[in-house]
Image: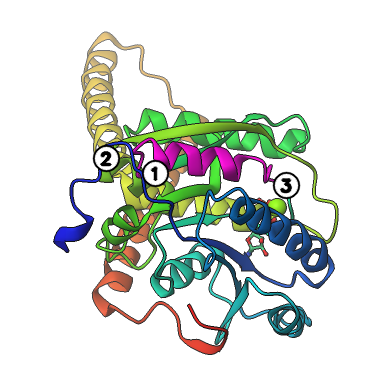
Amino acid sequence: MNNEIINQNTVRSEIPSLAIVVPCYNEAEAFSRGVTELSKVINDLIAKKKIKNDSYILFIDDGSTDNTWFQIKQAGEEMLHVRGLKLSRNQGQRVAMLAGLTSINTDVSISVDVDLQDDLNCIEQMIDKYMQGNEIVYGVRDDRSKDSIFKRNTANMFYKLINLMGVNHIPNHSEYRLLSKRAIHCLLEYKEQNLYIRGVLPLIGFKSDKVFYARQERIDGQTKYSFFKLLSLAIEAITSFSVFPLRLIAILGFGTCILAIISMFYGVISKIGGFAVQGWSSLIISIFFLSGVQLLSLGVIGEYIGKIYIETKQRPKFFIDETIGKF
Ligand code: UDP
Ligand code: MG
């Protein structure tokens, strides 16, 4: 690792250059308000001398099919601190964010969504915490009352499950966070194809802190996450961080064997005692149950094997199609 970026774990004195990294997928409706508000924040922080003048907002167009890229281009021409990066196709929010983090060369990055659901006032607090020596500052939603009941409950279930599996995870942290150059460097050392950033960050270590905010409703456009997309992300997160489901299968298999042995003894004893019952339904139920368990187990194993298959191919994660401005 580069020597100049080691040992910065103390209070900082030099003001940093900042890149706000914003993935956008079909955000034609939300973009205009997003870029206006983010520009205000950048200009305000520059005026307050909290960040360097060469700070910028980097919008990553994640293969949008509407005119998001056109709008980013236009903003790049009209506004001083706007840059753009277009991916060759839709890769998902996390990959788009990684593409952004890989491309920037500033002292700090702050990743945020374009829809303004995350409170932009936290950006200044994040910078302050960076100046206090933190390498990572997590944005944490301490009020999710504006999220739908469904989203809140499924998120809670997910956090409980992932905790149960022993994954170190910061509940209610979304993708809103500050990363120092050093933290980005470490994050990019994780070469997994489906990098679950929220799970990896606590593993990196270093001094980190949190800022709290109330999650807002989306004003323009719509969420890009359907129920099935969320479910697949949850499975992805669990299987990339824990082998607990595989262990659970072994435990289940062991339990079933014990049950089989007990029933064998019972069979023999009932035969000897003359109280054996010819049970058709119990037989069918146990066949269904056991084949269900077996198929489910195969599915879980398949999920992990599929992961190994994808990882071994080591395919490139994204391709950059076009860029706007220097970064
Ligand atoms: N996003 C992306 N690629 C995708 C899906 C979403 O870049 O495939 C972006 C999206 O444009 C937004 C952010 O990720 O800036 C969060 O998406 P969204 O607001 O739909 O998620 P939610 O807030 O509903 O969880
Ligand atoms: Mg959103």
In the rendered structure, does residue 6 fall within the stretch colored magenta? no
x and y, in percent, of residue 127 in the image: 49, 44
Magenta-highlighted residues = 117-136
Q: Residue at x 49, y 38 (%)?
A: 128
For the residues bearing labels 1 and 2, Cβ distance under 8 angstroms? yes
Give the quadrant of the N terminus: bottom left
x and y, in percent, of residue 190 in the image: 27, 61
Secondary structure under tag 1 reads strand
Label 2 – label 3 distance at C-alpha: 28 Å
Q: Residue at x 25, y 40 (%)?
A: 9
Disc 2 designates what residue? 206
Nearer to us in this view, 135 or 154 = 135
The amino acid beneath tag 2 is Phe
Q: Note whether ligand 1 is within 8 Å of mark 1.
A: no
Disc 1 designates what residue? 136
Label 1 – label 3 distance at C-alpha: 21 Å
Q: Tell me: residue 65, above or below residue 129.
A: below
Nearer to us in this view, 207 or 275 = 207
Secondary structure under tag 3 reads loop
Disc 3 designates what residue? 117
